[in-house]
Image (cartoon, rainbow, N blue to C red):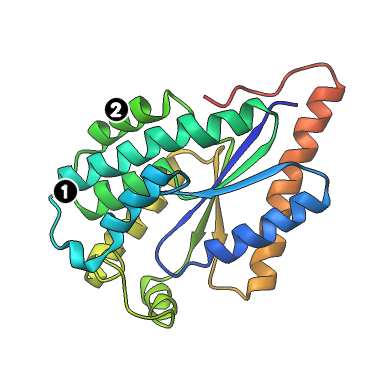
Amino acid sequence: MKGLFITLEGIEGCGKTTQLRLLSEHLEQRGAGVTVTREPGGTPLAEALRGLLLDPATGGISPLSELMMYAAARAQHVDAVIRPALDRGGVVLCDRFCDSTLAYQGGGRGICMDEIRTLNALATGGLAPDLTLLFDLPVETGLARSGRRGAPDRIEGEPADFHRRVRDAFLDIARAEPRRITIIDASAPVEDVFRSVCAVVDGLFQTRQNATLGGSAPPDRA
């Protein structure tokens, strides 16, 4: 089968990184070749940009500069990590992707969504996830969780109203693309959240397997 591209999205403290680890272990037990990566990050260049973007000591970055830095990291990430893994027929699990840019730089910073979509398309060469899991919970709950991890990074330290705009943008994106994006209740216990994740992902694997056995190819990613 073709490679499978799954992204995990959500506000700060939604638990997606924990679910990413659990899902990777689950898929590896099924015999899948899994590449686990993140944005911004995944390559030396992108990790360096991540450090600048998240470090509070970096100080103020204009919204447009911030957007361009995320796009540069993504272009390198897609070219060096994501596309090669998909071309090998593997499963790519990515902690954040284009939806985060729409939610944070669009919803949070107020940059035009259509302009962000154009830049995302350029950075990715039109690559889109087969499935996106959106882990949703109240902003106050997420920020309380992330606060227990230690001092906030540059994004976590934004005011609560910023994070509410981000959450609203994520939900708007999900409502606009229900075939790609599944909303998961991230306020539930970790085990319950993971059962919901497995139900969605295992269902996708079964659908693709049935399509292959039936002689019809699954839809293209892009």
The residue that label 1 is drawn on is 63
Residue 212 drawn at (x, y percent) = 81, 23
Residue 131 circle label = none
- Near-viewer residue (156 or 114): 156
State the SS at label 2.
helix
Q: Residue at x 69, y 35 (%)?
A: 90
- 109 in relation to 90, above or below: below
Give the Cα separation between the discs numbered 2 and 1: 16 Å
Q: How many marks?
A: 2
Q: Earlier in the sequence, mark 2 or mark 1?
A: 1
Residue 99 drawn at (x, y percent) = 40, 44
> Please, which residue is most extreme toward the top here?
215
Residue 5 drawn at (x, y percent) = 60, 37
Residue 208 sits in which quadrant? top right
Residue 76 drawn at (x, y percent) = 40, 34
The residue that label 2 is drawn on is 118
Q: Residue at x 41, y 75 (%)?
A: 146
- Near-viewer residue (44 or 194): 44
Task: Answer with left or right where residue 213 lies relative to residue 195.
Answer: right
Residue 138 sits in which quadrant? bottom left
Q: Check disc 1 and give the amino acid type.
A: Pro
| Quarter of the figure with the N terminus | top right
Query: Label 2 crowding class (10 Å Cα cut-off): few <14, some 14-19, many 20+?
Result: few
Q: Is residue 139 visible?
A: yes
Q: Residue at x 30, y 61 (%)?
A: 54
State the SS at label 1.
helix
Task: Answer with left or right where residue 202 lies relative to residue 107.
Answer: right
Of badges 2 and 1, nearer the viewer stands: 1
Q: Is residue 40 visible?
A: no
Q: Residue at x 49, y 33 (%)?
A: 80
Residue 55 sits in which quadrant? bottom left
- 2 in relation to 133, above or below: above
